[in-house]
Amino acid sequence: MRIDIISPLPELVESTFKTSILKRAIEKKIVKIQCHDLRNYSSNKKKQIDDYSYGGGGGMVLMVEPISKCIEKLKNEREYDAVIFMTPDGEKLNQKISNRISQFKNIIILCGRYEGVDQRVRDIFINMEISIGDFVLSGGELAALVLCDSVIRLKPGVMSNSSCALSDSFQDNLLSAPIYTRPENFKGHKVPKILLSGNEKKISLWREQQSVNRTKKLRPDLLDKE
Ligand code: ADE
């Protein structure tokens, strides 16, 4: 899978791919990440990428030209399954969306900054708009990283235990069962006996029950989802 990330602050994104599971996925060539500095696509000597909003109003708006140049260059090089814009008014990210995107071969993720982007960018180039929640970040970069992490960990070979990603919370609209490791007894707080029983069938049943109970208690809304 190839992910092209377009941003006015590519350093913010790049640093995260130098550690952890994401770094491993890149080293194993399961995913290729290419970050593009929007300023390199400005036709202006000052490398300007934003301008005042027509009609007045506060902040600066990312201009259509540099973004268009960058996306068109990429599209001339290969086909993309999706051109995604990270924005608080997009569709709220969930496991189903991450699963779907993890099947794509090539995607572009555009990160906005300032007040937003010229609407024509969204009208012409964007075919998926994703929010990571009902709050406003100062830019799309952190949201893009959240999306990338949730997608990349689903690719076969990324997690050391391949069944892990599939048993995550939300994969079946259920939260995960509680998990424990040593010691068996921490200041009187004991690991549930069933987990020490060695009876796989009983453990699996217990985990299922715990999942359902936890979901009912903490996220009953998930149980209504298809
Ligand atoms: N950009 C700013 N806020 C965002 C959010 N909540 N989700 C996605 N992109 C964003």
Image (tube, grey):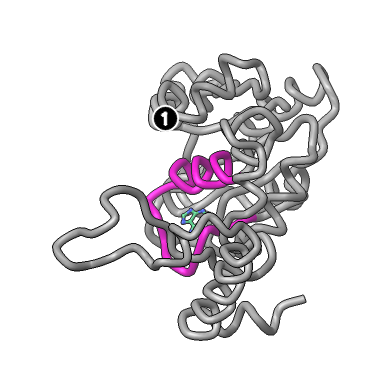
For image coordinates 65% across by 81% down, the residue present is 223
Q: Residue furthest right?
A: 79
Give the magenta range: 130-150
For image coordinates 66% across by 25% down, the residue present is 70
Q: How many numbered discs sit on the rendered protein? A: 1
Question: What element does badge 1 sit on?
Answer: helix
In depth, the one of 92 and 59 nearer the eye is 92
Q: Position of residue 203 (x, y in %)?
A: 56, 63
Q: Position of residue 83 (x, y in %)?
A: 73, 41
Q: Position of residue 5 (x, y in %)?
A: 59, 31
Is 159 situated left or right of 20 in this image?
right
Which residue is tagged 1?
16
Q: Position of residue 214 (x, y in %)?
A: 49, 77
Is 85 situated left or right of 20 in this image?
right
For image coordinates 52% across by 74% down, the residue present is 210
Q: Is residue 107 visible?
A: yes
Q: Is residue 167 above or below residue 26?
A: below
Is 73 situated left or right of 89 in this image?
right
Query: Is 48 a magenta residue?
Result: no
In depth, the one of 78 and 222 nearer the eye is 222
Q: Is residue 206 above or below residue 55?
A: below
Point out the image quarter for the N terminus.
top right
Amino acid residing under circle 1? Thr
For image coordinates 80% across by 26% down, the residue present is 75
Query: Is 149 a magenta residue?
Result: yes
